[in-house]
Structures are given as structure tokens and as C-alpha cells.
Amino acid sequence: MGFALLNPPYIMTMSTAVRNNTARSRFELDVDGGIAVANYKIDGDVITFTHTEVPPRSRGAGVASRLIEAALQAVRAQGLKVVAHCAFVQTYLTKHPEFRDLTAQ
């Protein structure tokens, strides 16, 4: 199953556009100093987040949280379940119970 967002492939969050770069299997957010990314793999109806990275200049400003929030909103819209192999995504899901229903059993 492919993963696509509505056309155009953007989710708006806090006046920034998070995009799903399906060719690179990652969500992206342009930030000062580069691109923040959340890498994933899809198998059937399960998306596995494998790594989240924010450019050094943008760390500590909530960029990763905005990125993951938008990614999880997109996942919900597509009816996918989440496996978090990324420590940041695991922590985010723990702190945000509104997304826990997305967790694959």
C-alpha cells in the first residue's frame, strides 16, 4: 500500500508546511539551517518511524514535535497504524495520549 497525502502533499502546522516525501520515505519540514526529517517504512497498513533528525541550529525549538505531530495527523487521515522504532517518536506518543490510538498492537 502506498502512502500519499492529499494534493498538494502538505500538512499545515503552526504556520509551517510538513510534506511527505514518499520518494525518500520521510516527512520533511524546512527549518532555518536545513530540513528536519522523520524517516519511515511502510508495510501494509503499518508505518514504522525509524529516525527523526533536526539540523543542529534548530534543535530545542520544538521542530521535531511539530514535524511528528503533522506526520501523525497524516497517518491518522490515511488510516495507518504506527510502530515507533525512533526514540523521539516513542517519547512523543507517551506525552501525547491523543495519538496513542494509532499505535499498532
Image (cartoon, grey):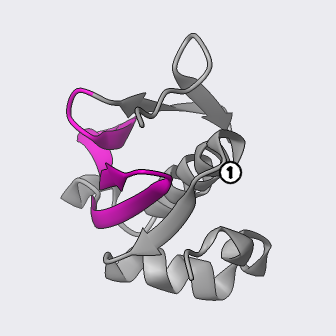
Secondary structure, magenta segment, majority class? strand
Up-down: is 55 above or below 7? below
Residue stretch rendered in magenta on the structure? 23-52
Which quarter of the figure has residue 60?
A: bottom left
Give the percent coordinates (x, y) of residue 29: 40, 38
Point out the residue furthest to the top here. 7
Q: Secondary structure at mark 1?
A: helix
Point out the image quarter for the N terminus: top left
> Mark 1 belongs to which amino acid?
Arg
- Which residue: 55% across, 11% down? 8
Q: Is residue 90 left or right of residue 42?
A: right
Up-down: is 60 above or below 33? below
Q: Residues within 10 Å of mark 1 (few under 14, many from 20)?
A: some
Which residue is denoted by mark 1 in the rendering? 76
Q: Which residue is at the front of the view, 51 or 41?
A: 41
Up-down: is 62 above or below 26? below
Q: Is residue 21 left or right of residue 82?
A: left
Q: Which residue is at the front of the view, 83 or 59?
A: 83
Which quarter of the figure has residue 52?
A: bottom left
Which quarter of the figure has residue 53?
A: bottom left
Up-down: is 19 above or below 27? above
